[in-house]
Image (cartoon, grey):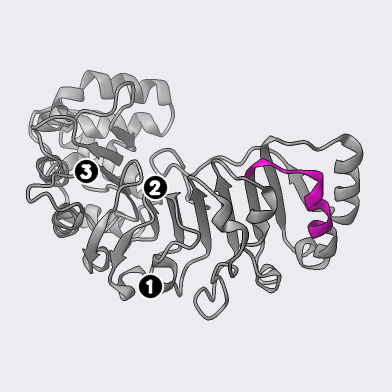
Amino acid sequence: MATTKPRRTAACNPELEASIDEAPDDAERYWIYGDWLESQGDPRGQVIAAARTSRKRERALLEKYGAQLLGPLARIKGAPGAAPLRWRYGFIERARLRRRSATPSLAEQIELLLAHPSARFLRHLSLRTPDHGDDTPGYRQVLELAARRAPRTLASLALGEGGESIGDLGDALGALPSLRALCLFADTAHLDPKSTEGVVALSVQRIRAREPALLQACAWPSLRHLELHYDYVGAAWSEGPPLPLGEDLFPRLRSVTVHFSRAWRGEVLLQLFDVEHLRRWSALRLDTIFLGADLDAWFFRNADALGGLGELRLAAQELGVSRERADRLREALPNVVFGEIPIADPFEDAEPAW
């Protein structure tokens, strides 16, 4: 189609934007908006048109019009070697904001991002290293700011860094009505129990306690995918009740993934589960340092429950599984798969399925 000369000011069509809000994963709605933007001389329209046919052409146009499409967002810097922004269909789809110097602060970065037309259809937001003006750790202030400014399309949120306490978030999550995926890089966080009712996928990383307190402190009626990543497991883990993953707290839970960074013994991992819970799930993924032969008895003893899983994936840095042993396990459990289990990264993962 014929295009006019690109202009410097961004065009806007509220009706077409509302259409994308209703179905932000429907590419066709972006194509329609892109045609309209291109007819208005907005270079974003050219970027969207290129996204339909050529990633190479799309990247070239993003580079060509980068200064115009970014504007003040150029002040946002990512971690060394990592881009803080990801684009899709001419708009920023994912943003990883991290305070790296006095200015801009994390709050200022949020203001810059969410006020900008390029973030109009933001899908994922990751917040790291917040300001602690009163020396009180926590993300509540910046999260409340993000919730006030966030578009309706925001569906995925990651908070924390390095295992520090995230603090008291109050009901800030409840102000994000489209939130479906939540990733917390800490095992200490205080949330309003009702603020998590719409969360479908939860990843809790840098865990140091046997049972992350927030599992029982919040309501999870919609949760289907759960990932737990334990930083360290010591002797105190030898005894204790299974994790509270029953139907009363997690009525829709279907997929569970557990990672251990440094497990003393692989059998400790298996003590986390009530075998009866497995009968409701469709996937169980276990990732530990060493998956020794002494665990075989557990797999054989619970073959009936484990065999009903659609996916049973085992991974270990020191697998210790001979071909003969693997064959025996596969004979008892035809659904078992040995292979890598990546740790969830909401900034990278196209679809959270934790």
Which residue is disc 3 drawn over?
119
Circle 1: element type:
helix
User: Which numbered mark, 3 or 1, is in the foreground of this view?
Assistant: 1
Residue 207 drawn at (x, y percent):
44, 52
The mark tally for this picture is: 3
User: Which numbered mark, 3 or 2, is in the foreground of this view?
Assistant: 3
Residue 313 circle label: none
Residue 96 drawn at (x, y percent):
28, 38
Q: Residue furthest front?
A: 235
What amino acid type is highlighted by mark number 1?
Ala
Distance CA(mark 1)–CA(mark 2)? 41 Å
Up-down: is 310 above or below 125?
below
The residue range painted magenta reads 288-299
Which residue is disc 2 drawn over?
28
Residue 146 drawn at (x, y percent):
18, 53
Query: In the rendered structure, which disc, 3 or 1, sits on the residue that comes first in sequence?
Result: 3
Which residue is disc 1 drawn over?
217
Contact between marks 1 and 2 (CB within 8 A): the answer is: no
